[in-house]
Image: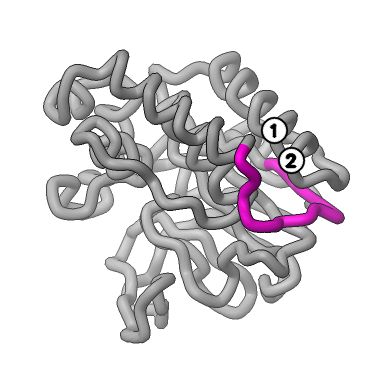
């Protein structure tokens, strides 16, 4: 199975880097006290470093994500990038719910580095995964909903050979390939736009990889996709 970024993506976002963590043979139990503690620590770190929601929107990495989302037609006030939505909830005093080990670990990484992170169950994916541009109107059922919510033309989406699995980069996960407690083989993706550097992304990926190995086991490998290397075998 391949994970690939289509050339059209780089025409709109030439500096985009996508970190890919392939996880095989993991045990995705409900989160342990240690995993939940790591999530709460990431929340405290955000509250300590970001004064309020307006300051959060001005953070350089968050601002870059909003700019890209606006470029493909998304209203970021109504539909903020995933890292902004998570951090905004935390800055306002909320806590993220515990979901399962992999999701809670990648949410903690997203908060810590203010980068979008998501994941898919490889066993429910239908063939290769591609980050590409939506034609518009493709069927898509978001996680937690039953109604079709198709993408806009030109929107950045992840898709497999069956259909779209995640909209607007990691903004909205689909039902079909979401990570559950039954997940044993997964891919986690972390997106970085300038001014976030490759080195920053490598550090964030390394921390998430180590956390997955510690708390979920399995065999875990890390790659970074970009214009020069747009594809990897999962």
* Residue that appears at 52% across and 68% down: 165
Q: Position of residue 232 (x, y in %)?
A: 75, 46
Q: Which residue is mark 2?
A: 215
In reply to whether residue 27 is colored magenta, the answer given is yes
Bounds of the magenta span?
Answer: 21-33
Q: Which mark is residue 211?
A: 1
Lateral position of residue 60 relative to residue 223, left or right: left
Local SS, label 2: helix
Q: Position of residue 192 (x, y in %)?
A: 47, 30
Q: Residue furthest front?
A: 33
Local SS, label 1: helix
Q: Nearer the viewer, residue 176 or 169?
A: 176
Relative height, residue 94 to residue 57 (above, below): below
Q: Position of residue 18 (x, y in %)?
A: 57, 38
Number of numbered discs on residues: 2
Lateral position of residue 178 relative to residue 145, left or right: right
For the question of whether residue 14 can be seen, the reply is no
Relative height, residue 9 to residue 51 (above, below): below
Q: What whole-number distance in Å separates the C-alpha atoms at marks 1 and 2?
A: 6 Å
* Residue that appears at 54% across and 40% down: 36
For the question of whether residue 160 can be seen, the reply is yes
Q: Quadrant of residue 28?
A: bottom right
* Residue that appears at 19% across and 46% down: 76
Q: Quadrant of residue 172?
A: bottom left
């Amino acid at each position: 199975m391949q994970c690939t970024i289509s050339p059209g993506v780089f025409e709109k976002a030439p500096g985009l880097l996508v970190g890919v963590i392939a996880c095989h043979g993991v045990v995705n139990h409900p989160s342990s006290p240690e995993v939940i503690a790591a999530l709460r620590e990431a929340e405290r770190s955000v509250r300590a470093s970001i004064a309020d929601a307006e300051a959060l929107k001005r953070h350089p990495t968050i601002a870059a994500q909003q700019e890209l989302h606006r470029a493909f037609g998304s209203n970021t006030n109504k539909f903020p990038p995933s890292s902004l939505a998570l951090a905004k909830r935390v800055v306002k005093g909320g806590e993220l719910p515990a979901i399962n080990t992999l999701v809670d670990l990648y949410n903690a990484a997203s908060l810590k580095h203010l980068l979008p992170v998501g994941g898919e169950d490889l066993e429910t994916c239908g063939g290769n995964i591609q980050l590409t541009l939506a034609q518009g109107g493709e069927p898509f059922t978001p996680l937690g909903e039953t109604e079709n919510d198709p993408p806009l033309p030109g929107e950045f989406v992840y898709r497999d050979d069956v259909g779209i699995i995640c909209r607007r980069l990691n903004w909205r996960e689909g039902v079909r390939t979401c990570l559950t407690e039954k997940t044993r083989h997964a891919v986690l993706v972390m997106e970085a736009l300038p001014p976030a550097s490759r080195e920053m992304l490598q550090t964030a990926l390394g921390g998430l990889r180590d956390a997955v190995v510690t708390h979920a086991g399995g065999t875990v490998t890390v790659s970074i996709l970009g214009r020069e290397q747009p594809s990897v075998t999962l």
